[in-house]
Image (tube, helix red, strand yellow):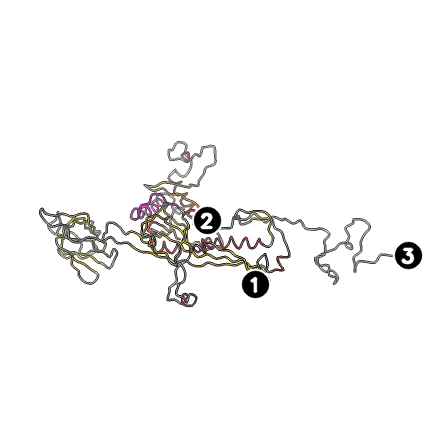
């Protein structure tokens, strides 16, 4: 009588669909036999869709909201910004009727002339006097200039301290039948410049891996959706690179052209690095530390904010400004505004949340997207870059930035005329034959490209760009 042979040691099929220890196939080796990757009695349930556990992971979009992108043909961009129309001096001293202006501190131009009238202020004694320049200014010691003057309402200047005085010109006063004003004031401007950096990246997949297709259903951050296989990694590389384009414009700094980094890695003399937004604001703008909205959400926080408004008054006094904040600082501003409404809903109070369309029967909205203080309007939004745990949210030293809305008038060296530009904008290298705003090309011998003997597909990315931060004196950087 015949019998069935076993399909390997310990493996015996059954007449019906019974689950036994002797009749199932498995992926792992059993008794030395190689059943790896062969089969399994109960196949796993496989989800084709990715789980977006970090939500939208991209960080770019900030510069598109507040600025623009414009081409340029040079490896340097230069712009000029107006200086103040009226000039005051902080470090003025006197001896009798002789005043000395220190040229070592800005502004470095003296516009004081004979027969001009001026205001002088003593911050120690809190005394203000007005005087007339009675002699033409003369050079004093290097970096100084002297002139004689008499007060209008006092016999002398003895009510003022001898040092630490402040002064500014407000007009002139001439006797009848006299000559006109001697000399003139030549308007000056301040030049700034920046240079583009070359940002590169690459994605590589070898030819063998392209033949092993593994499908994944995705909904990517750039708006595309559907099924991808090995190009899924290329898609994320491109998204990451696009984030780098913006992050580099925000974070970059210029290297010392004579330093080790520039000398070793940029021997052609082009320099290294570019000035990003944070560096420009720290150098030419306003930096405010430890905003106390959450710690002291009442009048203390409002006092902090009013100090910022006073600084804006001293600068361009641009009425509309945008606040891009991290989560903690955004809540500080919400607390500051909510404190002005009594800290909650009050049906009998005119300063209640009812003014913000919050009825008593509905949940209160404790978030504010805009507010007005003094003569300024502010529009507030979260900046994801400052909250992301793998970027600035990990460092947590930058709390937010305030950017003026609108455009500024500057003198363009290439055009030879005044033009209007957004305060914050990107310049990228481009010509009629090559646009380096965002280049992408494929090399290798896989994926339709046959440019080399490399058994792989290489996707290359390149951009050459820089950021122009104009009128940085109107920007505010919030730091820890």
The label number, if any, that marks residue 61 in the structure image: 2
Q: Is residue 278 one of those drawn in magenta?
A: no
Q: Helix, strand or loop at disc 1?
A: loop
Crowd class of label 2 (few under 14; some 14 to 19; many from 20; radius 10 Å): some
- Disc 3 and disc 1 in contact, CB within 8 angstroms: no
Q: How many marks?
A: 3
Q: Earlier in the sequence, mark 2 or mark 1?
A: 2
Tag 3 residue? 1
Mark 2 vs mark 1, CA separation in Å: 36 Å
Q: Which residues are magenta?
A: 301-322
Q: Looking at the image, which residue is at 62% across and 51% down?
A: 215
Depth order, front residue of 316/478: 316
Residue, disc 1: 452
Q: Residues within 10 Å of mark 1 (few under 14, many from 20)?
A: few
Image quadrant where residue 38 sits: bottom right
- Residue 232 in picture, x, y percent from top left: 57, 53
Percent across and percent down for residue 27 are 71, 57
How packed is label 3: few (under 14 Cα within 10 Å), some, or many (20 or more)? few
| Dominant secondary structure (helix, strand or loop) of the stretch shown in magenta | helix
């Amino acid at each position: 009588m015949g019998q069935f042979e076993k399909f390997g040691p310990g493996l015996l099929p059954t007449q019906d669909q019974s689950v036994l220890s002797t009749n199932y196939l498995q992926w792992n080796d059993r008794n030395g036999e190689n059943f790896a990757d062969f089969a399994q009695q109960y196949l796993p349930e496989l989800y084709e869709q990715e789980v977006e556990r970090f939500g939208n992971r991209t960080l770019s979009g900030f510069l598109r909201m507040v600025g623009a992108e414009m081409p340029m043909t040079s490896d340097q961009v230069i712009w000029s910004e107006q200086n103040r129309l009226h000039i005051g001096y902080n470090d003025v001293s006197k001896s009798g009727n002789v005043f000395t202006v220190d040229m070592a501190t800005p502004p470095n131009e003296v516009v004081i002339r004979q027969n001009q009238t001026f205001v002088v202020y003593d911050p120690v004694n809190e005394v203000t006097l007005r005087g007339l320049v009675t002699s033409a200014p003369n050079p004093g010691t290097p970096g100084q200039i002297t002139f004689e003057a008499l007060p209008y309402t006092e016999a002398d200047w003895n009510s003022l301290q001898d040092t630490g005085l402040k002064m500014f010109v407000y007009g002139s006063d001439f006797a009848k039948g006299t000559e006109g004003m001697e000399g003139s004031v030549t308007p000056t401007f301040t030049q700034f410049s920046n240079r583009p950096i070359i940002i590169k990246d690459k994605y590589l997949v070898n030819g063998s891996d392209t033949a092993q297709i593994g499908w994944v259903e995705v909904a990517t951050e750039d708006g595309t959706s559907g099924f991808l296989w090995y190009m899924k990694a290329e898609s994320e590389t491109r998204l990451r690179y696009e984030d780098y384009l913006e992050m580099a414009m925000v974070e970059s700094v210029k290297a010392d052209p004579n330093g080790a980094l520039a000398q070793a890695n940029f021997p052609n003399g082009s320099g290294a690095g570019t000035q990003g937004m944070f560096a420009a604001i720290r150098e030419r703008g306003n930096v405010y530390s430890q905003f106390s909205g959450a710690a002291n959400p009442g009048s203390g926080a409002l006092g902090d904010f009013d100090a910022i408004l006073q600084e804006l008054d001293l600068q361009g006094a641009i009425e509309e400004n945008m606040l891009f904040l991290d989560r903690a600082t955004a809540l500080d501003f919400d607390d500051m505004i909510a404190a002005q409404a009594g800290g909650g809903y009050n049906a009998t109070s005119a300063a209640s949340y009812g003014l913000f369309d919050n009825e008593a029967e509905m949940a209160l909205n404790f978030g504010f997207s805009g507010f007005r203080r003094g003569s300024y309007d502010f529009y507030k939004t979260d900046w994801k870059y400052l909250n992301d745990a793998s970027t600035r949210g990990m460092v947590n030293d930058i709390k937010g930035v305030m950017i003026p809305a609108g455009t500024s008038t500057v003198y363009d060296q290439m055009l030879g005329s005044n033009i209007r530009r957004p305060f914050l904008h990107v310049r990228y290298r481009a010509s009629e034959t090559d646009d380096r705003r965002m280049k992408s090309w494929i090399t290798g011998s896989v994926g339709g490209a046959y440019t080399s003997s490399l058994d792989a597909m290489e996707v290359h990315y390149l951009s050459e760009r820089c950021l122009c931060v104009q009128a940085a004196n109107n920007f505010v950087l919030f730091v820890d």
